[in-house]
Amino acid sequence: MRRGGNAIGVQIRPATQADLDQANQLVAAAFPEAVLDHEDALQRLAEEPGFRPQEAWVAVDGSRVLGHVATLHTTMALEGQWVPALHLGTVCVHPSRQGRGLGSHMLRTVCAQAAGDAELAILTPAHNERLYSFYQRLGYVHVLQQTPRLLIRTGDLPVAPPSARPVRDDDVGALAEVHRATYVAINGSFGRPIDAWRHRVAGHARLWAFHQATFGVAGDPEVRAYAARTVDDVDLEVVEWAAAPGCSDEALAALAAVCHPHSQSQAVVHVGPHHPLRHLLHGAEQEELPPDEEWAMLLVLKPAAMANRVREWVCGRVPPGWGLKVGSGKVEAAGPDGRLMCELGAAVALLYNGASAGRLEAEGALHLHGNVEALLAACFPQRYASPSPLDTI
C-alpha cells in the first residue's frame, strides 16, 4: 500500500476547513437512512466542545470529497491501564464509489499515518451487520457483548435543581479524576488483539474512556459526578454516567435532567444494584442483572433503524397494484381508491410511545386521501390494534 494515499486514484489527507461542508453532505449521501434531524445532528456535533474537525481525514479526487473519517487522539482504559488511543469514527464513502475498495483503503491509510503507537478503537452499532463485516475483513476483533439492561422513560427523569450547570473547561481535570476513580476496577472494554493490526470492534458503544466526556459534559465537580453525551451522526446517541461514592441523589438527578437525551423518549440504562443512579429507576422494567455490575450507562438508539422498520411495515401494507414511491423520509402510494403518505419521522415518534396504526392517521403521521375507510381496511385491517413495527427491532 502506498503511503501517499493515491493507490486507487484518490488522495487521502487531513481535512481542512474548506472540506467540511462537502464532508457533512457526504455523511448524508452515504447514510440516507439517517432520516431524522440529520442537519440538526451535524450542527449539534459541530458545537460540541470536543469536536475537532482538524482531526478528520478525507479522500479527494481533485476538489471533490469522496470519503471522510473522523479521528480523535485520546486515552482509553485497557486491562486496567490508561493508554494512548486513536478513536476512529464512521468511514463515509460517496455512493458512487462504494463497493470499490475506497473505504478499506482509506481506513488502512489513516491508521498507518495517524495512529503512531496508539491503540486503535472503532465503535459500530451491533445491529449493523454490513459495518460489522466490513471491519472484520480488515482484521478488527469483536471484544464486547451486550449486557442485561433496564428500560426507563427519560421523560420521567427529575427536573434539574438550580445547582446543575454545564461543565467548563477548567472542570475537566477534576471530572477526569472522578471517572478514573469510578472505573478503576473495570477491566477495559478492549481485549488484547490477536491480529497484527491491533484493531478493536467495540460492539454497542461501550467505550470506557474519558474522551467521551469531552464531547459534551454536564455536571458539577463539587459533587464529584458527571454525565457525558456523544453523538454518532447516524446511529447512536449515548449518555454515560460516572459518580464517586457519596454523590447525592440531588446531584445525580440534576445530571439526568441537564444531560437529557433528545433523540427519543425511551432509553436503555445499564446499572448495577449498588450504583448511585439506582434511585432514578423506580418502576423500571428490569431484566436480570449480575450482582457485581458497578457501572452505569444510558443508551438511546437514534431513529434510523426504527425508520427503516416503519418503512418496511408501511410498504408491506400497500395494496397490490398500487404505485409506490419510497423516500428517505416518507413513503407514498397511490391507487384507484386514493393515496396515502407516511411521514417516517412522525410515525417513529408515535410508535415509539406505543401508538397503534390508527393513531398514526389521527396524529398526522399517516395521511390518507380518497376512500379513507377502504384504505384503512386494506392497509391496516386491525386499525386500533396493529402491532408496532418496533416490536421486532
Image (spheres, helix red, strand yellow):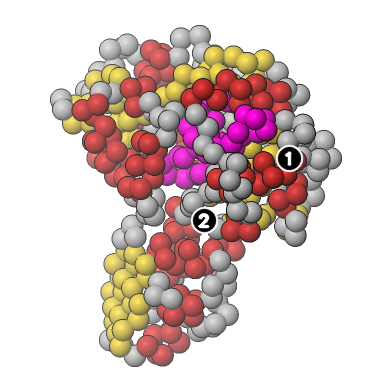
Query: Which mark is drawn over residue 264?
Result: 2
Read off the residue under disc 1.
248
Query: Is residue 146 one of those drawn in magenta?
Result: no
Q: Find residue 154 and report its horizontal and vertical position in percent.
A: 60, 55
Q: Which residue is drawn at 59% across and 14% down?
A: 83
The segment highlighted magenta reads 209-238
Amino acid at dot 2? Gln
Q: Is residue 181 left or right of residue 327?
A: right
Q: Is 347 in front, or is 181?
A: 181
Q: How far apart are marks 1 and 2 (CA)?
A: 27 Å
Q: Which residue is drawn at 34% across and 64% down?
A: 330
Q: Quadrant of the N terminus?
A: top left
Residue most extreme to the front: 162
Amino acid at dot 1? Ser
Q: In which quarter of the image is residue 9?
A: top left
Mark 1 neighbour density, 10 Å: few (under 14) some (14–19) many (20 or more): some
Q: Residue at x 65, y 30 (%)?
A: 222
Query: Is residue 228 one of those drawn in magenta?
Result: yes
Mark 2 neighbour density, 10 Å: few (under 14) some (14–19) many (20 or more): some
Q: In which quarter of the image is residue 102?
A: top left
Q: Is 120 in front, or is 196?
A: 120
Secondary structure of the residue carrying tag 2 is: loop
Query: Which mark is drawn over residue 260?
Result: none
Q: Earlier in the sequence, mark 1 or mark 2?
A: 1
Residue most extreme to the right: 291
